[in-house]
Image (cartoon, rainbow, N blue to C red):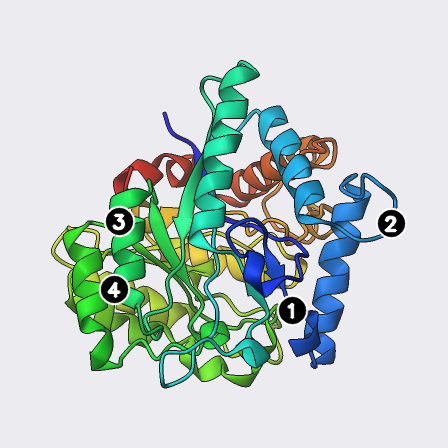
Amino acid sequence: MNRIDIHCHMVGNGDDINNLDNDVFFNPKSDNIWMTKTAYAMLEDNLRKQGADLNGDKTISTFEFTELLYKLFTESKELNGIALLAMDAVYNDDGLIDLEETYIIVSNRYLDNLVKKLNQRLKNDGYKDKRFYLGASVNPKRKDCLDELKYVIEQTDAVLLKIIPSAQHIKLMDIRHKPFFNMMAKAKLPLLSHVGPEYIFPEGINRKELDNYKFLQNPLSCGVTVIAAHCCAPVFPIYDKDHIKEFSEFMRTVNADGRIRIYTDTSGLSFSTRIPYIPEIIRLLDQRWVLFGTDFPVPIDTWQHLPFITYHMDITEYDKIINTKNPFDRDVLIKRAHGFGDSILDNTVKALRL
């Protein structure tokens, strides 16, 4: 059975915009919001604690992140698949790249090549039952979006296409995107779209209105299978409005005839501030619609899952969680203890372009 984490980010620190086919491009100069600076520092600190800083220079390079990811995946007892996510740039209204507003670029060509190399390495190392998958990213605002999408469909083994509307300045309801979504539907390439609050990217905060789950109606109307990330859960309980009930009703309406047109994923739900929403999510969402995702390298901690905080978790489950060092396995155990069935791991074969 394919047990795939469908939501794992590829990160790195390349600084050459002309080297997109060979490295992740990271543009910290665009990060002018204290909240995203804090979030990035937290992610980097978490990766260092896991041993990613191989040369001790206090930064995490693309190579170092890749090595850590490979180590964690090969050690995982729960997963045999991880979908690594690309990230296209921000484009202006003329379809040209806008570097001032772009935080990170993980190109499809770079990530496709990396996934192939990692899979060959897995084979050589004897991990025949494990595989990385490509989660492509194409911004439908780019001038050559149809050509890039055609490349993804015809020349890669991409299992999905990932976007973050706010961070990439994408207006999902724009009718000009219909040819793009029609091409996706014809190729049976699912869309993984962020919904709800986004605090990792500066533009996620500046343009948060673009991450509205209701806007998914446009790709859905074109026949695209949609995966709405994070179950639409708030990040900060007091600051963010809770739309989970309305989101569940939206999913129920879209999937009313028994055919699942929209899924959601559990990525980021193990983050401390989202814990209070898990009982509501489990109560309202049909788990046939739910896919497993971690949101790695977003930290997956254990202290916030103390039994007296997380309701029905017993001490035996908690003891197993705190003694599981692998973050991917820990995330599986946490969600299992909270009431998610293993079906969320098994549902992936139904949703992805495998």
Q: Residue furthest right?
A: 56
Residue 352 visible from this viewpoint = no
Mark 2 or mark 4: whose residue is earlier in sequence = 2
Q: CA distance from mark 1 to mark 3?
A: 28 Å
Disc 1 residue crowd, few under 14, some 14–19, many 20+, Cα 10 Å:
some
Q: Residue flagged by tag 2: what amino acid is it? A: Asp
Disc 4 residue crowd, few under 14, some 14–19, many 20+, Cα 10 Å:
many
Q: From the top left corner, tell me how far across and down residue 266 is, in percent.
A: 47, 51
| Residue at 61% over, 50% down | 311
Q: From the top left corner, tell me how far across and down residue 344 is, in percent.
A: 40, 41
Residue 116 visible from this viewpoint = yes
208 or 111: which is nearer to us? Answer: 111
Tell me the residue that label 4 is attached to. Answer: 146
Q: From the top left corner, tell me how far across and down residue 170 is, in percent.
A: 38, 76
Q: CA distance from mark 4 to mark 3?
A: 10 Å
Q: Residue flagged by tag 4: what amino acid is it? A: Leu
Q: Which mark is residue 153?
A: 3
Instruction: Tell me if 250 is positioned left or right of 86 in this view.
Output: left
Q: Give the vertical position of 189 relative to 223 (above or below).
A: above
